[in-house]
C-alpha cells in the first residue's frame, strides 16, 4: 500500500487549470503502474473533514488536528518486495509538491 502524505496548506487555492494538471499527473503515474499489471486498487483521495477517536474515549475534530501532515490518499499495488514498491513510487505527483510516499505491506490472514 502506498500512502500519500503532505503538509496542509489552507492558503492553497488552485485554479481549475492547476487542478486539471494535477489530476492528469496522477492519472498518468497510476496508468504507468497499471500498464505494468501492478495496480491492484486505485484507492481514493481522502477528504479534509473527519473526527478522531482516542483511546480515552475523547473525540477531536479533524483527522489531523494534532499533526503537521495529512494523509491525502492511497493506492494498493502488487509488488514482490518493499523495494519494488518503492521503485513504483518513483514519479508520484505527491513528491513533486514536497510530499512523501509511505510504502507499507498489507498483512493477509487466511480465513479472513
Image (cartoon, helix red, strand yellow):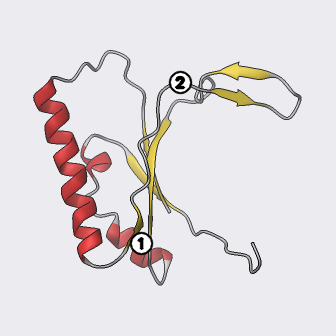
Q: Which is nearer the eye, 112 or 58?
A: 112
Residue to which mark 2 is pinned: 49
User: Which residue is located at x 75 percent, y 72 percent?
Assistant: 112
User: Which residue is located at x 48 percent, y 27 percent?
Assistant: 48
Identify the image quadrant of residue 89.
bottom left
Q: State left or right for residue 40 relative to residue 24.
A: right
Whether the residues at callouts 1 and 2 have beta carbons within 8 Å, the answer is no
Badge 2: few (under 14), some or many (20 or more) residues near its Cα, within 10 Å?
few
Q: Which is nearer the eye, 91 or 46?
A: 46
Q: State left or right for residue 17 relative to residue 72.
A: left
Q: Position of residue 46 (x, y in %)?
A: 46, 38
Q: Position of residue 28 (x, y in %)?
A: 18, 58
For the residues labelled 1 and 2, the Cα–Cα distance comes to 29 Å
What label does residue 85 carry, if any? 1
Q: Position of residue 40 (x, y in %)?
A: 43, 70
- The residue lying furthest to the bottom in this view is 80
Callout 2: SS? loop
- The residue lying furthest to the left in this view is 17
Q: Position of residue 68 (x, y in %)?
A: 52, 30
Q: State left or right for residue 104 relative to residue 43.
A: right
Mark closest to the chain's N terminus, 1 or 2: 2
Q: Which of labels 1 and 2 is toward the front?
A: 2
User: Which residue is located at x 58 percent, y 28 percent?
Assistant: 64
What label does residue 1 carry, if any? none
- The residue lying furthest to the top in this view is 11
Q: Which is nearer the eye, 97 or 47?
A: 47
User: Which residue is located at x 36 percent, y 43 percent?
Assistant: 99
Callout 1: SS? helix
Vertical arrangement, residue 102 with respect to residue 11, above or below:
below
Q: Which is nearer the eye, 23 or 92?
A: 23
Badge 1: few (under 14), some or many (20 or more) residues near its Cα, within 10 Å?
many
Vertical arrangement, residue 75 with respect to residue 88, above or below:
above
Amino acid at each position: 500500500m502506498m500512502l500519500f502524505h503532505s503538509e496542509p496548506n489552507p492558503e492553497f487555492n488552485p485554479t481549475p487549470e492547476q487542478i486539471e494538471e494535477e489530476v492528469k499527473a496522477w492519472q498518468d503515474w497510476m496508468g504507468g503502474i497499471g500498464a505494468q499489471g501492478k495496480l491492484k486498487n486505485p484507492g481514493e483521495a481522502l477528504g479534509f473533514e473527519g473526527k478522531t477517536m482516542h483511546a480515552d474515549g475523547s473525540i477531536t475534530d479533524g483527522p489531523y488536528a494534532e499533526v503537521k501532515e495529512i494523509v491525502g490518499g492511497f493506492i494498493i499495488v502488487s509488488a514482490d518486495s518493499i523495494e519494488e514498491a518503492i521503485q513504483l513510487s518513483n514519479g508520484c505527483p505527491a513528491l513533486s509538491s514536497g510530499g512523501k510516499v509511505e510504502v507499507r505491506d498489507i498483512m493477509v490472514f487466511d480465513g479472513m
